[in-house]
């Protein structure tokens, strides 16, 4: 296995690519080496337990040779494989989120067999930064088996991390207590590990990158002091009441609703939650952009040109309101806003119709404005039955066209949630043409859509 792993590493081309056999081969041999290491460690533990017989088949196992093999295998993984994988996902060279997810999952997997006694800064920082990166950038499957089961087309599977998701969750959960214990016992390594998480999660650097001590002062990270917040780490730059957990204490006369609102909306600049692998920046948790937005037709141009047709993109909430969602794409300098359908009935809102359109058609037409009635009056009952149109009180006698507006009542029980639709009618003088537009709301902007024209070659 060691020889297989070394020969696979020798084939490295500096990055992971599916078109080359070196990348998948390196990841496969790495997974194989970890599984072999786990079996050997289990065998050593069972064979070296005083007072207990050896398991069947391992009666003549030479523990010294097995211990040497385990050390050689781990040395190869630590000295060759881990630095190579971290080189692959350097944000300067790697722009593929799917590939980064794949490598981060394997980085977590390489520490599957670590015990607490083997933990050091690198293992803690890799486990923390990789699990936070996956929680932000990987869309985990809700199916019981594997993420490949989520695709209806087997020829186009979703991006896979090539490791069972349940196994990744098992590793993260199994190492969580050891990580917290190590950080408590080694606060300086914990501070450095938290800074590594920030760099990896925000894409501003690598895990192994050493910060410039001259320009940035090393922050001290501690878990929030309240018993219910153990594992939520914040730096010493945060508010003192947040760091000691006193903000969670109820104030005199405060009911549960007010307490819950105050606690959940407490302003947090930056937080690393080790318990649930979450990273919070400026009071907003980083996450993947909603799948419905990724597939929306209005987002496809940006997805193809800016995001290079990425299957997922990380984002952070800016501000959500009742009818509007606002996200900021991480590292892209783009904001995404999505509006819920506007269910207001504008016909009932005073002032919706332009106040300048106060003259009812065809009443009080001037002598020179009879051309409007000649063009429109006969067609009006056919194209806009029951609609009362209004026009500007200004003289339209010598104008090239006239502009009229009015409401039409929608049929009840249809798909349209509104009871009325605003109609705009453009009547051209010469040649005589009637054009009717629907005024529709889209992204809280009111736009015209062509509904009818009496002359296709001359419509606007």
Image: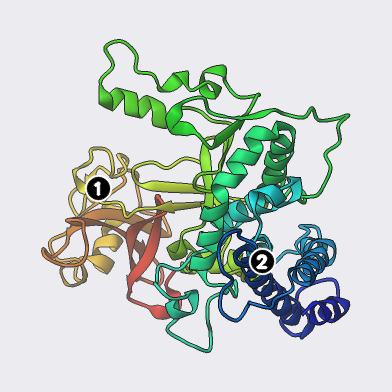
Residue 120 percent location from the top left of the image: 74, 46
Identify the secondary structure beneath mark 1.
loop
Residue 368 percent location from the top left of the image: 31, 54
Which residue is denoted by mark 2 in the rendering? Answer: 44
Labels in figure, total: 2
Front-lying residue, 21 or 124: 124
Q: Quadrant of the N terminus?
A: bottom right
Residue 356 percent location from the top left of the image: 32, 41
Front-lying residue, 272 or 395: 272
Q: Count neighbours of disc 1 (C-alpha within 10 A) and say few if under 14, some if 14 to 19, many if 20 or more.
A: few
Q: Count neighbours of disc 2 (C-alpha within 10 A) and say few if under 14, some if 14 to 19, many if 20 or more.
A: many
Residue 295 percent location from the top left of the image: 47, 69
Q: Residue at x 78, y 68 (%)?
A: 64
Place residue 98 in its image quadrant: bottom right
129 vs 224: above or below: below
Q: Quadrant of the C terminus?
A: bottom left
Which residue is denoted by mark 1 in the rendering? Answer: 344
Front-lying residue, 37 or 367: 37
26 vs 442: above or below: below
What is the image's colouring?
rainbow
Q: Residue at x 46, y 26 (%)?
A: 226
Tell which circle, 1 or 2, labels the residue nearer the N-terminal end. Answer: 2
Task: Give the CA distance from mark 1 to mark 2.
Answer: 71 Å
Residue 332 shows in the view:
no
Q: Nearer the viewer, mark 1 or mark 2?
A: 2
Left or right of 190? Residue 406 is left
Left or right of 286? Residue 61 is right
Left or right of 375? Residue 271 is right
Identify the secondary structure beneath mark 2.
helix
């Amino acid at each position: 296995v060691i020889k297989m792993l070394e020969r696979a590493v020798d084939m490295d081309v500096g990055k992971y690519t599916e078109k080359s056999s070196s990348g998948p081969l390196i990841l496969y041999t790495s997974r194989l080496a970890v599984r072999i290491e786990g079996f050997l460690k289990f065998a050593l533990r069972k064979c070296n337990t005083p007072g207990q017989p050896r398991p069947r088949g391992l009666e003549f196992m030479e523990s010294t040779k097995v211990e040497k093999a385990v050390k050689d295998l781990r040395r190869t993984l630590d000295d060759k494989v881990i630095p190579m994988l971290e080189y692959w996902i350097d944000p300067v060279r790697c722009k593929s989120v799917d590939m980064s997810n794949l490598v981060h999952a394997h980085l977590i997997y390489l520490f599957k067999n670590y015990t607490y006694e083997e933990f050091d800064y690198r293992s803690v920082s890799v486990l923390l930064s990789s699990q936070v990166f996956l929680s932000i950038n990987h869309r985990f499957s809700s199916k019981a088996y594997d993420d490949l089961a989520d695709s209806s087309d087997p020829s186009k599977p979703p991006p896979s991390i090539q490791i069972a998701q349940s196994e990744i969750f098992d590793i993260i959960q199994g190492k969580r207590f050891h990580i917290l214990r190590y950080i408590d016992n080694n606060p300086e390594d914990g501070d450095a590990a938290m800074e590594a998480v920030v760099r990896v999660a925000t894409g501003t650097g690598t895990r192994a990158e050493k910060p410039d001590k001259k320009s940035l002062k090393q922050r001290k990270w501690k878990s929030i002091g309240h018993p219910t917040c153990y594992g939520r780490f914040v730096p010493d730059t945060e508010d003192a009441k947040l760091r000691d957990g006193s903000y969670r204490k109820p104030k005199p006369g405060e009911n549960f609703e007010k307490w819950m609102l105050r606690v959940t909306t407490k302003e947090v600049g930056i937080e690393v939650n080790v318990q649930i692998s979450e990273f919070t920046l400026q009071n907003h948790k980083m996450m993947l952009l909603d799948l419905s937005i990724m597939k929306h037709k209005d987002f496809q141009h940006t997805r193809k040109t800016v995001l290079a047709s990425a299957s997922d993109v990380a984002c952070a909430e800016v501000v959500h309101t009742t009818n509007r969602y606002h996200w900021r794409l991480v590292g892209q300098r783009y904001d995404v806003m999505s509006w819920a359908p506007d269910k207001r009935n504008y016909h009932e809102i005073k002032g919706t119709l332009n106040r300048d359109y106060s003259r009812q058609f065809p009443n009080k037409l001037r002598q020179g404005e009879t051309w409007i009635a000649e063009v429109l009056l006969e067609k009006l009952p056919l194209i806009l039955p029951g609609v009362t149109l209004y026009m500007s009180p200004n003289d339209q006698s010598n104008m090239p066209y006239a502009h009229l507006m009015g409401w039409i009542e929608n049929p009840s029980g249809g798909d349209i949630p509104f009871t009325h639709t605003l109609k705009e009618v453009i009547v051209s003088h010469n040649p005589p043409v009637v054009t009717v537009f629907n005024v529709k709301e889209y992204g809280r902007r009111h736009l015209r859509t062509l509904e009818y024209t009496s002359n296709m070659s001359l419509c606007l």
